[in-house]
Image (spheres, rainbow, N blue to C red):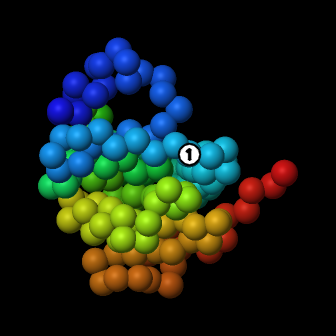
Amino acid sequence: MQWQEVCEHPSLKNLPFKIELNERGEIIMNAVKVIHSLYQGEIEFILRSLLKTGRTMPECAIKTPRGTKVAGVAWASKERVKLIKNEIECSIAPEICVEVHSSSNTDDEMTEKRELYLACGAKEVWLCKDGKMSFFNFSGIIQKSILVPNFPELVEIES
């Protein structure tokens, strides 16, 4: 199955799952809990507050050699947005791709996604696990984001 078919398939619309494709075109679905959505929303809000140019994107589909992966939050410069805005899935990853770790994710899966996003053009990949942020670029783990140095190391969800 191709990503456009997933997007257009009537039985796959409005599902409470995150959908991705593996390298064989098989649908992978992950149910997410409310806390996952809260972290995604807060990360997107902070990114939008700190970066006044470019665009944030929730649930951003990215074409990779291992199928279509969906970054929980992404940020792309105006230049990159011009390249990808009319695509079904991003042919080049946004500069920042963020994954929020949920109970259904394995560390190996998160490592694979990080490597795929970087290979597809991301400059940084961020991982959020229980609010704690980890930042990566081609060199590996970095102490803080180079693109957004003021991004907090801990994302807090107020109740």
In the rendered view, tell whether residue 13 sits above or below residue 21: above
Q: Is residue 13 left or right of residue 27?
A: right
Residue positioned 17% across, 50% down in the render: 23
Q: Is residue 52 left or right of residue 115?
A: right
Frontmost residue, 62 versus 26: 26
Image quarter hosting the N terminus: top left
In the rendered view, tell whether residue 105 sits above or below residue 141: above
Q: Does the rendering let one see residue 98?
A: yes
Q: Where is residue 129, by image quadrant?
A: bottom right
Frontmost residue, 8 versus 44: 8
Query: Residue 29, image x and y in percent?
Result: 40, 41
Q: Does the rendering let one see residue 126?
A: no
The kind of residue tagged 1 is: Val
Q: Where is residue 65, by image quadrant?
A: bottom left
Residue positioned 50% across, 84% down in the render: 143
> Around disc 1, counting alpha carbons within 10 Å, would you say few (fewer than 14), some (14 to 19), or many (20 or more)?
some
Residue highlighted by disc 1 = 32
Residue positioned 29% across, 19% down in the render: 8
Frontmost residue, 29 versus 151: 29
Query: Residue 103, image x and y in percent?
Result: 56, 59
Query: Residue 158, image x and y in percent?
Result: 81, 55
Residue positioned 29% across, 39% down in the render: 27
